[in-house]
Image (cartoon, grey):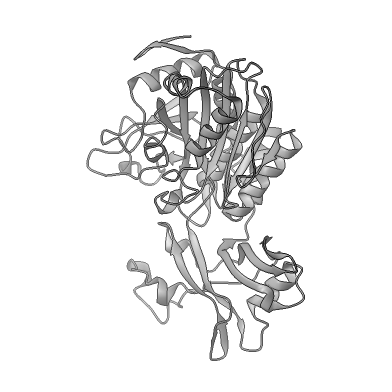
Amino acid sequence: MDQIQSVLDFIDAGVSPWHAASEAADRLQRAGYRRLEECAPWDLAPGGRYYTTRNGSAVLAFRLPKVCRIDGWRMVLSHGDTPSWRVKNLDLKQGVYRKLETEGYGGMIMGSWLDRPLTVAGRVVVRTPGGIETRLVCPDQDLLVIPSVAIHFDRSTNDGRKWNPQVDLQPLYGTENSSSLRELLASEAGLFQATDILSWDLSLTPRQKAVRVGPAGEFFMSPRIDDLECAGSSLLAFLESEAEEDVLAVWGMLDSEEVGSSTRQGAQGSFLPDTLSRIWDALGLSRQSYYQAAANSLILSADNGHAVHPNHPEKSDPENGPVLNGGVVVKVNASQKYTTDAVSAALFGEICRQAEVPLQRFANRADMPGGSTLGNLQGHTVSSPMLDIGLAQLAMHSAVETAGTEDIGHFCRAVRAFYQSTFHFSRDGACRM
C-alpha cells in the first residue's frame, strides 16, 4: 500500500515535465543524494550518491561503487513528458470571451480533453534583480475548459469526428473582463509585475488526481500514467535497492519522448553519455574501462505498454497481449522499435524469476504497426545491452488513463531485483549469474 500511494503521489505531483523532475529531485535530496550542476565542476567520491538535471525537465541519478572501479552499470530510463497542449499566448482576447491559444504536444486522444476542468502547469522565466531565473507554476484552481459543441448543433457528433485542433480544441479561459493569465501567473510566481514574466513553457493539465477504481481498488485512473507510473515506480525501487560493490546504479527520467526525443534533454540528446563521461573523468578511469563496463551492463527502457482492451480484444495480438495486474511487460518488435533481444530478455527473465515477479509479453499484431519509445534512440549513444519493459494500461494518450494497481508492486520488485543483480558477461552473448 505504501508503494502504491507513493507512486500515485508522484503522478499527482508531476503535472508537467518540470514538476515531475522537481518531485524526483526532492525525493532524491531527501534520500541523501547530492545535486550536481552541469555548469559547475564535479567532485565525485567512491560510494557517493548524486543527481543532476538538464533543462529542468530531465533527471539522472547515480550511486557510485565504494571501490574506485566500475565493472558495469544497472540503469533504468523512463520519461516524464506526456501528450498535452502547449500554451502559445498568455494574453488572448476574442470578443466577449478570453481564450488561450495552444498547440498539440505529442499524439493524444483529442476528444478526451473536452468538458473537463483544466489548469496550466510548467515553468515561467522571470526577471530578477540579479538576472533571470525559472519558477514552477501550477494554479490550484479549475481554470479552463474546452467545451464540446452541443449535439443540437452537430447531429453527426456520435458518428465519428475529425478534430481540428485550431478550431475545436482551444480552451476557454474567461470573459473579456477577466484578468489575464499572465497576471495570474505573475502572482503565482511571487512577482509584483506581470511584465517580469519573460517567457514560459506551459501546458494544459487535467485537474483530476489519481483515484483507485473497481470493487477492491484493482485499477487506478489518472492523467499521465504514461510514463510517470514507470518513472515513479523505478525511482522508488532505485532508492530502496543497493547495488553490488563494483556496479554503477543509474536512474533516469528523460524528456521529449512524446515528440521524438530529439532535444538536448531527450534520449537522442547527449545527457546520458555526457553524464557517464563526467563520472569517468572525475574518478580518473580509463576509456578502455568505459567500453568494458558498457558491454558488461544492462539498461531497462521503461515505458508503459497496451493492455488487451475489454471491449476491443481484436486490437491486440492474440498470443502476446498483456492484461492489467498481470505483471511486468517485456516488449518486443521485429522492426526493432523496441530494443529487447533474446539475450536481454533471457537475462531480465531470470532476474524476475528469481525475484518471483510475473512477466508478460507484448507484441503488436502483425498487421498493425505500433509506436516506439526512448530505448532504441538512447541506444544510438550508449551501446549497452538493453530491453524495453513497462506496465499494461488502457486508454494510452487519453487525458485520463487506466492501469492496474497491483502492477506497481510487481514493477518495484522487478526493478529492485535488477539493481541488486550480480550478472557478469563472460563473452558476447554469455552471462554468469
Residue at left 56%, top 72%? 145
Residue that protrudes farthest toward the left in the picture: 367
Residue 203: image location, x then y, percent: 55, 63
Residue 265: image location, x then y, percent: 50, 48
Residue sitting nearer the eye, 376 or 262: 262
Please tell me whether residue 170 is drawn above or below residue 204 in the rendered image. Answer: below
Residue 102: image location, x then y, percent: 49, 71
- Left or right, 188 with respect to 396, comes to right
Residue at left 64%, top 80%? 180
Residue at left 52%, top 23%? 73
What count of labels does the image hold? Answer: 0
Quadrant hosting residue 151: bottom left
Residue that protrudes farthest toward the bottom in the picture: 95
Residue sitting nearer the eye, 394 or 60: 60
Quadrant hosting residue 61: top right
Residue 155: image location, x then y, percent: 36, 77
Please tell me whether residue 374 is drawn above or below residue 395 in the rendered image. Answer: above
- Left or right, 282 with respect to 150, comes to right
Please tell me whether residue 171 is drawn above or below residue 2 in the rendered image. Answer: below
- Left or right, 42 with respect to 352, comes to right
Residue at left 69%, top 67%? 141
Quadrant hosting residue 231: top right
For residue 210, say whether it is visible: no
For residue 309, say whether it is visible: yes
Image quarter hosting the N terminus:
top right
